[in-house]
Image (tube, rainbow, N blue to C red):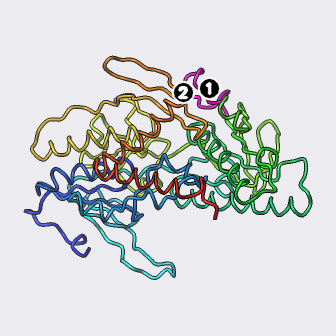
Amino acid sequence: MEQNTKQRSNDAPHRIVIVGGGAGGLELATRLGNTVGRKRRAEVLLVDRYPTHFWKPLLHEAASGHIDPAQHDISYAVQAKRHSFRFVQGDFKALDSNERRITVASMVDEENREIVPAQQIPYDTLVLAVGSVTNFFNVAGAEEEALRLENVEQAEQFRRKLLAACFRAGHEKNRTGGSEEPLVNVNIIGGGATGVELAASVRDAVEHFADYRFAALDPTKDICVRVIEGNDRVLPGLSPELSAAALSHLLRLNVQIMTKARVIEVRKDALLTAAGDVLPSDLTLWAAGVAGAPSLSHCPGLRLNRNGQMLINTTLQSVADPRIYAIGDCASIDPNLGTGWPITAQAAHQQAVYLASALAANLTLKNISEFRYRDGGTLVSFGSAGAVGRVASQMPPITISVKGSLARILYALIYRRHLVFVTGTLRASAATVSQWIKGRLSPPVRLH
């Protein structure tokens, strides 16, 4: 790591530094490593605070205990070795665009002893793929009391708290016989894809909890799972038809839905709405909005929008510095230059494909075209209850609504496609088989 802090020589290969190993960042590093990195036309370096990659759309399944994140992790170090790039673990802290270098924080152990000191990493081209964080919109108590679902650690925190709440409820019912009111209240604020997928997944999980561990609990009566949405329907980004289909799925799963409801305060054990409702809450999860990663605010010279995302142009370059690019959730096109795209893994994948080609072309001084987002549709899963969504095609330009088993199969294939893009067909196939076998040998949800 020492060489990262030294001035680079004039004959050193062009260095492309990618900060963030999410859906877009890891795929970009892999594609560049396989091309310019393997041919030694450039040095490709990936920086991330974690040692492993986890596909963010699976977080709701990790939070409900349906999957073990360890079975779905991809080691950055192993990926780097196989695909001709380098990996540096550390938390991105600052950017000096004049000197063309980033600062990565020191690593410490569980006793706060320094393992690796802070370091500065020079770059010729920088790609920021640092993702997003939860936007609480300054609602009183939300940041302090509400859980969030941004990474595996937070998913595991939610899962442990859900299990603990069910343990307490089971013990209380055995002791007192229960009550007419629910013993566990799970409130999910936000009726977008994350909120409804988590609600369906939690409702399925508590059914299994009752079967395996908490026989005294009636999952329908004793455990309330509630989605609170400010708009007049869940999944407001989809068509009214698909939104209605999603609502039907949720109601069949005994998920309570509150629409046109605005939360104005989050307390330790309750929520307060603008209409004056006080909702009891054992677990509150906020899924009502995102903002750019806080690390971007420590990057003087970059231009950010009001959500803290970096403003970029149609070639994904910073409007303030053409040597800096951004992809994924942390990026937003300058509204004076074009129309934006959704904050999804689909958009991050398309940007990674585009930028891998564009940065390779830059090394040979070739002109590149502008990035064009192509909407492939949206799918929302309700676990074993099915899925709803739409699939879109550019040629011919059609959009088809899908529901039920077909939508569920298509949803599962999205993750498998991501594995193929990142690890290759053989390893993706082996991982699929391994996960299938593990699923057949284990209970439907994690029970401890």
Q: Where is residue 37 in the image (x, y as percent from the top left)?
A: 17, 56
Give above or below for 354 relative to 397: below
Q: Is disc 1 in contact with disc 2, using a CB cutoff of under 8 Å?
A: yes
Secondary structure of the residue carrying tag 1 is: helix
Q: Where is residue 9 in the image (x, y as percent from the top left)?
A: 11, 66
Per the image, the residue denoted by label 2 is 403
Nearest to the observer: residue 293 or residue 427: 427
Q: Position of residue 331 (x, y in %)?
A: 39, 43
Give above or below for 385 relative to 181: above
Nearest to the observer: residue 398 or residue 230: 398
- Is residue 54 visible to us here? yes
Image quarter hosting the N terminus: bottom left
Q: Position of residue 432 (x, y in %)?
A: 40, 50
Residue at 66% across, 54% down? 146
Looking at the rendered structure, the kind of residue marked 1 is Ala
Indicate whether residue 234 is drawn in magenta: yes
Indicate whether residue 61 is drawn in magenta: no
Image quarter hosting the C terminus: bottom right
Residue at 37% across, 35% down? 334
Toward which corner of the image does residue 295 lie, by quadrant? Answer: bottom left
Q: Which span is picked out in magenta?
A: 230-247
Which label number is shown at residue 360?
none
Which label number is shown at residue 245?
1
